[in-house]
Image (cartoon, rainbow, N blue to C red):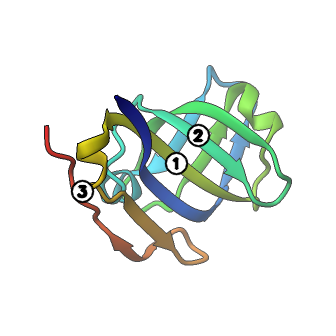
Amino acid sequence: MHITMLKSKIHRVTVSHAELDYEGSCAIDLNLLEAANILPFEQLHIYNVSNGERFTTYAIEAPRASGTIGVNGAAAHKANAGDLLIICTYAAMEAHAARNFAPALVYVDADNTIAHCSNGKLAAV
């Protein structure tokens, strides 16, 4: 049996910009992507702490150490500059592997710079 587990979370990042006239996605500072083990074009679940909106999109790289969190395309209707977001990814895995799995959790400061994190542990294949 496969179950879906939280793979990674970037907790309470601040939206730097929302751009409606863009094909879609969420631009994330490369430092944050790497710390959270999120790949470019990986599906994201985004929870807007500021207004309660929830939406799904995909990740794209923003310049390293830029602090960028850019919500693009139709999703820009669901987030504004200054909003706080929780960005998550999930992974399906066998139940026995899930018991030994820990997600990558990334916590940031007000500038979207990594404050602390836990790198999680990979599931056995």
Q: Is residue 104 left or right of residue 108?
A: left
Q: Nearer the viewer, residue 70 or 94?
A: 94
Mark carried by residue 44: none
Instruction: Tell me the element at label 1.
Output: strand
Real-space CA distance between mark 1 and mark 3, rounded to the nearest whole angstrom: 19 Å
Q: Is residue 66 left or right of residue 21?
A: left
From the viewer's perspective, is the residue at label 1 or at label 3 nearer? Answer: 3
Give me the residue at 41% from left, 28% from top: 41
Instruction: Tell me the element at label 3.
Output: loop
Residue, disc 1 = 88
- Is mark 2 in CB contact (under 8 Å) with mark 1? yes
Instruction: Tell me the element at label 2.
Output: strand
Please, what is the three-letter code of the amino acid marked with disc 1? Cys
Q: Earlier in the sequence, mark 2 or mark 3?
A: 2
Please, what is the three-letter code of the amino acid marked with disc 3? Asn
Residue, disc 2 = 45
Relative height, residue 40 to residue 124 (above, below): above
Q: Earlier in the sequence, mark 1 or mark 3?
A: 1
Check disc 2: other Cα within 10 Å, few if <14, some if 14-19, many if 20+: some
- Is mark 1 in CB contact (under 8 Å) with mark 3? no
From the viewer's perspective, is the residue at label 2 or at label 3 nearer? Answer: 3
Please, what is the three-letter code of the amino acid marked with disc 2? His
Residue 14 is situated, as x and y percent measured from the top left of the image, at 65, 62
Residue, disc 3 = 100
Real-space CA distance between mark 2 and mark 1, rounded to the nearest whole angstrom: 5 Å
Residue 62 is situated, as x and y percent measured from the top left of the image, at 44, 46
